[in-house]
Image: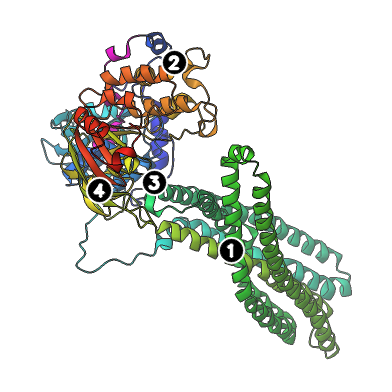
C-alpha cells in the first residue's frame, strides 16, 4: 500500500463525519467512496456462460462482504469477548456496492453491543493519548487495527507561545493488525504508516452488560426511537425558538409605528420624523422576512434529518419483526407506516409555528397593558374562553380521529388486496362485490370525516368570532379611556393591532389541537409496532456460526401458528447427517412447509428444538443461519427490478461469474438466451412479467448463489414443464453432492435426488427411513390413511 494518487473524496467524506464528533456517538450520513469488490467484466462473464456450470468453482467466499472496516470490527468484537461474524454484523444493513459508510459502521458495531465513534486524529495524537486499540482508516479503502505504540525514547515536549505540543519520536513503532492476517500483528514505523493513514480512526468500545438481578428495565419505546431522534437536533429547535422570539418582538414594529405617527407626527406635522420612523419599520420588516424564512428552513432541516433517521428505524423494525408479530393485513401495516407522515408534518408545518407562537399571546397582552392600561383585560378575558371551548371539544374530537384512522387503514387494506388480486377478481367476475365493499368503507370514512370537519369548523369559527369581539370591545373600552384622557388615539390603534396579533395563535387553536390529536394517535400506532418482538432483541447475545457442517435435527418439535389451536407439526423428531438428502412428502397441510420455516427460524417451536450442528437455531445469529441455509420457497416472491437484482438480493457484491453460474444451474439462462437484455431483463412487480416456472428458476438461482451447506427446496419444479424439470433435476444431482438437502415435493420423479424420505400426516411423522423402503411400504398401504393422503 502506498500513497500514490490517494483518492481525494475519501478524506472529504470522512472529514464531514468526524468534525465535531469526538464526543458524540452519532455519525451523520455520507456516502463512502469505496471500490467495488470482486466485480468482473460482465462481457467476459457472458462469454463463459455456455461452459458446463459444474466446471466452474464455487465462489461463495467472494460473494460475502469483504470490507476491511467490517473485518476489523469482527476482530475488535472478538477482542472484547463479543464473538461475531461479518454476516451477523451486516445482515439487514443497507450496504451498497461501494462498501460500508461511517454511519452504517456505527450501526454494525451496535449489533455486537459496541459503540463506535469516528474521530479526526493524527498518529502523534493517537500515540500520545494511548487510548487504544482503535481502527485506522487507510488510503485505498484499507483499514487496520492499531493495538499499541513502541517509542524508543520518552515523549518530547515542544514549546509553543500558547501551549505545549507533544510529538513522538520518528523511530516510533506502531503495532498494527490487518484484517487479512487474523492472528498476526506487525510493527510499522511512524513515517511509513503516515504515508497511508487518512487521519481518521474509529474508537470501538463495548457497551456494559447489565444482568437482570435488579429486575427488568422499564423502557419508554417512544422516547427511544422518536423523541431521541428529535433531541439530537435540539440545537436547531433552540435556534427556531430564538428566531420566534425575534419575530414576535419585530411584530411590535407596526403598532409602535402607527402609535407614534398618530400621536407625534400628525399633530406636529413632523415629516422628517415620519421618514425616520418609516425607514426604521421597513428595516424591521426586512429582518422579520429573513427570520421567518430562516425559521421555516430550520424546521424543514431538522425535520428532514429526523425523518431520515426515524423512517430508517421504523423500516428496520418492520423488517426485523418476528413473523408471529406481523399484522394480518399488509394494507393495515402500510397504513400505520404511513401515519408517520402526519407525525413528521406536525413538526415541520405551520402547526408547529403556531405552537411556538402560543406563549407569546401573554407577551402581547402585557405590551397592551403598558400602552393601553385596562384595555389589556379584554384579550386577557378572551383567552380562557377560547381555551375552555377548545378543550371541551377534545373528547369527541379524539374519538372521531381514532375512528377516522381505523377506517383509513381498512380502506388501505382493501385497496392493497384488490390491486394484488385484480386478476382473480376479474376471473371470478367479482368486481361488483369488491366495489360494494369499497363504497361501504368510503361512505363510513366520509361520514367520519364530515364529523371531524364540523368539530374543527366550530372551534375555528368560535375562535374567529371571539377575536372579532375582542377587536370591538378594545375599541369600545379605548374610546371611554380616551374620553377620560388615559390613552391617546395612537395608543388605541396600537392596542387594536396588538390584540389582533395576540389573538392570532388562538384562532389556530382548532387546527393545532386537531393536528396534535392526529399526531398523538399516529405516535401511539407506531409505538405499538415498535414494541413488537424482533428477531434481534438488543439484550440477546447470539452464537456466531459463520460456517456450518450441515447436521440437522428436530427434537420433539410442536408448533402452532398464531391463533391456531391445531398444531402444524406435532412431536416431530428426525435427524440428518451432513450431506444427506431427504425428501419430505405428505398431503396438503401436513406440515411440510412448516419444517422449512422452523429450520430457518422464521417461526420458533412452541416446544422442542430445531438444531443445526447441535446448536438450537434460536441461538444462532439470523444472519449466519440464513447465510448457511439456502431456501427456495413454494411460492417465491420476486420484486420489481431486473433478474440480476432479484438474484443478488442481499449479495449485491456478488461477481458476475458467480451470478452467471447460479443462473445457468437454475435454468435462468435458458429463458434469457434469446433476450437482448439478458440478466437485466425486467421482472415486473411481484415478477408478473415472468411465468411461474421462470420465477421459480430465479428463486432457485437466488438460493444457489452463495453456496449454502444446507439447501431446502420446497416444490422447486411445481410450475415447470417436464423438460425444464428434467434439466433442473440433472443439474441438481451434481449440485447437491456434499450438502444437506431437504426436498419438499409431490412429484415422484424428483425423488431420484434423495436417499431418505420423511412421510408426514397432519403434522406427525409417519415414516422416516431409506427412500426405497418408505416407498415400498407406502405402495403396500402399510401406513393406512396416511398413504392414501399422499400424492407420491
Front one among 741 and 22:
741
Residue assigned mark 2: 670
Crowd class of label 1 (few under 14; some 14 to 19; many from 20; radius 10 Å)? many
Q: Position of residue 651 (x, y in %)?
A: 36, 30
Q: Are marks 3 and 4 in contact (CB under 8 Å)?
A: no
Measured in 3D between alpha carbons, the distance from the residue under mark 1 to the one under mark 2, in whole angstroms, is 54 Å
Rendered view: 633 above or below 204: above
Residue at 24% over, 27% down: 754
Q: Position of residue 389 (x, y in %)?
A: 67, 79
Secondary structure type for disc 1: helix
Q: Position of residue 160 (x, y in %)?
A: 28, 44
Q: Which of pointers 2 and 4 lies earlier in the amino acid sequence?
A: 4
Front one among 248 and 51:
51
Q: Which of pointers 3 and 1 lies earlier in the amino acid sequence?
A: 3
Q: Which of pointers 3 and 2 lies earlier in the amino acid sequence?
A: 3
Which mark identifies residue 27?
3
Q: Is residue 268 left or right of residue 372?
A: right
Which mark identifies residue 518?
1
Most distant residue in the bottom direction? 484
Front one among 568 and 243:
568
Q: Is residue 11 left or right of residue 553?
A: right
Crowd class of label 4 (few under 14; some 14 to 19; many from 20; radius 10 Å)? many
Measured in 3D between alpha carbons, the distance from the residue under mark 3 to the one under mark 4, in whole angstroms, is 32 Å
Q: Which of pointers 3 and 4 lies earlier in the amino acid sequence?
A: 3
Q: Which residues are magenta?
A: 51-72
Amino acid at each position: 500500500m502506498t500513497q500514490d494518487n490517494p483518492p481525494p473524496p475519501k478524506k472529504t467524506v470522512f472529514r464531514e463525519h468526524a468534525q465535531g464528533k469526538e464526543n458524540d456517538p452519532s455519525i451523520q450520513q455520507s456516502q463512502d467512496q469505496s471500490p467495488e469488490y470482486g466485480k468482473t467484466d460482465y462481457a467476459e462473464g457472458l462469454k463463459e456462460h455456455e461452459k458446463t456450470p459444474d466446471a466452474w468453482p464455487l465462489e461463495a467466499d467472494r460473494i460475502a462482504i469483504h470490507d476491511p472496516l467490517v473485518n476489523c470490527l469482527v476482530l475488535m468484537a472478538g477482542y472484547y469477548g463479543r464473538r461475531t461474524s461479518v454476516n451477523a454484523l451486516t445482515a439487514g444493513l443497507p450496504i451498497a456496492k461501494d462498501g460500508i459508510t461511517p454511519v452504517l459502521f456505527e450501526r454494525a458495531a451496535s449489533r455486537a453491543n459496541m459503540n463506535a465513534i469516528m474521530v479526526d486524529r493524527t498518529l502523534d495524537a493517537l500515540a500520545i493519548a494511548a487510548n487504544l486499540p482503535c481502527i485506522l482508516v487507510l488510503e485505498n479503502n484499507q483499514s487496520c487495527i492499531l493495538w499499541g505504540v513502541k517509542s524508543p525514547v520518552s515523549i518530547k515536549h515542544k514549546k509553543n507561545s500558547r501551549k505545549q505540543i507533544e510529538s513522538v519520536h520518528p523511530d516510533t513503532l506502531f503495532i498494527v493488525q490487518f484484517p487479512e492476517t487474523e492472528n498476526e500483528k506487525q510493527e510499522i514505523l511512524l513515517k511509513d504508516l503516515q504515508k497511508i493513514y487518512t487521519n481518521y480512526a474509529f474508537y470501538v468500545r463495548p457497551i456494559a452488560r447489565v444482568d437482570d438481578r435488579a429486575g427488568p428495565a422499564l423502557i419508554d419505546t417512544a422516547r427511544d426511537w422518536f423523541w431521541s431522534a428529535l433531541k439530537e437536533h435540539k440545537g436547531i429547535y433552540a435556534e427556531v425558538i430564538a428566531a420566534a422570539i425575534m419575530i414576535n418582538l419585530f411584530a411590535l414594529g407596526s403598532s409602535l409605528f402607527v402609535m407614534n405617527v398618530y400621536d407625534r407626527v400628525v399633530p406636529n406635522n413632523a415629516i422628517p420624523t415620519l421618514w425616520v420612523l418609516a425607514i426604521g419599520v421597513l428595516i424591521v420588516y426586512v429582518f422579520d422576512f429573513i427570520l421567518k424564512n430562516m425559521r421555516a428552513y430550520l424546521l424543514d432541516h431538522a425535520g428532514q434529518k429526523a425523518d431520515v433517521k426515524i423512517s430508517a428505524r421504523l423500516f428496520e423494525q418492520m423488517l426485523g419483526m418476528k413473523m408471529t408479530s406481523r399484522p394480518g393485513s399488509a394494507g393495515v401495516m402500510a397504513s400505520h407506516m404511513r401515519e408517520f407522515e402526519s407525525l413528521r408534518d406536525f413538526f415541520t408545518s405551520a402547526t408547529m409555528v403556531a405552537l411556538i407562537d402560543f406563549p407569546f399571546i401573554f407577551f402581547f397582552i402585557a405590551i397592551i397593558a403598558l400602552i393601553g392600561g385596562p384595555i389589556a383585560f379584554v384579550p386577557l378575558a378572551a383567552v380562557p374562553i377560547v381555551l375552555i371551548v377548545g378543550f371541551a371539544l377534545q373528547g369527541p374530537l379524539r374519538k372521531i380521529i381514532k375512528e377516522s384512522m381505523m377506517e383509513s387503514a381498512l380502506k388501505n387494506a382493501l385497496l392493497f388486496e384488490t390491486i394484488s388480486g385484480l386478476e382473480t377478481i376479474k376471473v371470478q367476475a367479482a368486481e361488483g362485490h369488491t366495489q360494494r365493499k369499497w363504497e361501504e368503507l368510503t361512505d363510513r370514512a366520509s361520514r367520519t370525516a364530515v364529523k371531524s370537519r364540523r368539530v374543527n369548523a366550530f372551534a375555528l369559527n368560535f375562535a374567529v368570532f371571539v377575536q372579532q369581539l375582542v377587536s370591538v370591545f378594545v375599541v369600545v373600552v379605548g374610546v371611554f379611556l380616551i374620553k377620560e384622557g388615559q390613552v391617546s388615539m395612537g395608543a388605541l390603534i396600537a392596542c387594536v393591532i396588538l390584540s389582533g396579533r395576540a389573538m392570532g395563535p388562538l384562532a389556530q387553536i382548532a387546527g393545532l389541537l386537531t393536528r396534535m390529536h392526529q399526531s398523538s394517535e399516529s405516535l401511539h400506532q407506531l409505538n405499538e409496532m415498535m414494541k413488537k418482538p424482533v428477531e434481534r432483541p438488543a439484550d440477546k447475545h447470539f452464537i456466531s456460526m459463520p460456517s456450518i457442517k450441515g447436521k440437522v435435527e428436530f427434537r420433539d418439535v410442536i408448533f402452532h401458528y398464531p391463533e391456531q389451536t391445531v398444531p402444524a407439526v406435532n412431536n416431530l423428531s428426525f435427524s440428518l447427517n451432513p450431506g444427506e438428502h431427504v425428501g419430505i412428502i405428505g398431503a396438503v397441510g401436513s406440515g411440510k412447509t412448516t419444517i422449512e420455516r422452523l429450520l430457518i427460524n422464521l417461526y420458533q417451536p412452541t416446544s422442542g428444538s430445531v438444531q443445526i450442528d447441535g446448536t438450537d437455531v434460536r441461538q444462532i445469529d439470523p444472519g449466519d443461519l440464513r447465510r448457511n441455509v439456502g431456501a427456495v420457497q413454494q411460492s417465491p416472491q420476486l420484486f420489481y427490478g431486473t433478474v440480476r437484482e432479484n438474484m443478488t438480493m442481499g449479495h449485491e457484491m456478488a461477481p458476475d461469474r458467480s451470478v452467471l453460474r447460479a443462473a445457468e444451474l437454475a435454468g435462468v439462462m435458458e429463458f434469457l438466451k434469446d433476450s437482448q437484455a439478458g440478466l437485466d431483463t425486467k421482472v415486473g412487480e411481484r415478477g408478473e412479467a415472468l411465468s411461474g416456472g421462470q420465477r421459480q428458476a430465479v428463486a432457485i438461482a437466488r438460493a444457489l448463489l452463495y453456496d449454502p451447506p444446507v439447501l431446502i427446496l420446497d416444490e422447486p419444479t411445481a410450475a415447470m414443464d417436464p423438460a425444464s424439470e428434467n434439466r433442473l433435476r440433472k443439474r441438481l444431482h451434481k449440485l447437491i453432492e456434499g450438502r444437506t438437502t431437504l426436498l419438499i415435493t409431490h412429484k415422484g420423479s424428483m425423488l431420484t435426488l434423495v436417499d431418505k424420505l420423511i412421510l408426514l400426516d397432519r403434522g406427525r411423522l409417519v415414516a422416516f427411513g431409506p427412500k426405497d423402503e418408505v416407498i415400498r411400504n407406502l405402495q403396500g398401504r402399510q401406513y393406512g390413511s396416511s398413504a392414501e393422503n399422499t400424492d407420491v
